Amino acid sequence: MCPSTEPGAPAGAFRTSCGLEVGGQISPVFPILMPADWQHPPTQVCRPLIVGPQLPGIPQVALAYLMWEQSPGADTFYIRTERVKAISKTVADFEQEALHNLALRPASWGVMEPAPGARLAICANDALAAERILDGAFIREAQELLDTDSLMVAIPARGQLLATPLAPFVKGERHATVFKAMARQCHDAAGERGITTGMFIMIKGVMNSMAEYG
C-alpha cells in the first residue's frame, strides 16, 4: 500500500537571498527531484542525485521556485544559469539556500510494521517529502526510529520517502523483497509523478550508493 501524499505548508523563516519576487511576495528556492530521463534546456541548473557508476534511473536534482505554493494553479519555475548570473550568485549559493529551506519544511516520519519484525518509516506529509533524502538530519531521524544507522531508502514518487533497515537486504530476508515491491508499486501508481524505482543505501544520514534498479 502506497502512502498518500499531503501537500504540507511552508514553515517560514526561509532564506530568500536567491528568491524570486512575484506579486510582492518572495518565493524561496528549493531542490526538486526529477526522473533520470527529464528533458531540460542546456542551461538548466541540475545535477545527478549521486555521483559514481552511471547506473540507469539516477534522478536529477534541480532547483526551483514553487510558485504554486503561493499562488494555487501556478507553475514550477525551474532555475537556469541565466537566473543565477542575473542576481550575481553562484549555483553553490542557490543549492546551499535550497537545502537550508528544505530542512525548514514541516515534514515528519511515521512508522509501520507490515509484518512481524518488518518495520519501515514513511514520510508523505509534504510535497517535497522525497527531496528529504538530501537532508541528512531528517534521514537520521528515521534511523533513530528504526534503531539502526544503515538504511535502504526509496524515493518512488513525488511526495513519498520510504526507509527501512539495511540489514534485511544484506541477509536476503523476505522483508527486503516486500520493501522493493512496495517501492515499485508506489512508483508505477504515481504515473507522471514517479521519480525512480532505484533505492539508495544511506549510512548515518549520508548517501553511500545506489543499490538497485528495476
Image (cartoon, rainbow, N blue to C red):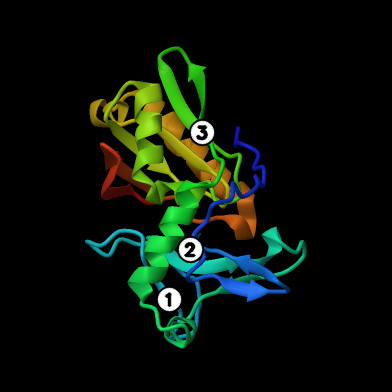
Which residue, given by chain and number where applicable, does mark 2 sit on?
35
Residue 144 seen in render: yes
The residue depicted at 48 percent of the width and 71 percent of the height is: 18
SS of the residue at dot 3? Answer: strand
- The disc labelled 3 sits on which kind of residue? Ile
- The disc labelled 1 sits on which kind of residue? Val
Q: Do the residues labelled 3 and 2 touch (CB within 8 Å)?
A: no
The residue depicted at 42 percent of the width and 69 percent of the height is: 94
- The disc labelled 2 sits on which kind of residue? Pro
Q: Residue 45 carries which label?
A: 1
Q: Earlier in the sequence, mark 3 or mark 2?
A: 2
Q: In which quarter of the image is the N terminus?
A: top right
Spot occupied by residue 186 in the image (x, y as percentages of width and height): 57, 43
Task: Report which quarter residue 70 is drawn in.
Answer: bottom right
The residue depicted at 61 percent of the width and 36 percent of the height is: 3
Spot occupied by residue 97 in the image (x, y as percentages of width and height): 42, 62
Label 1: how many Cα within 10 Å (few below 14, some 14–19, many 20+)? many
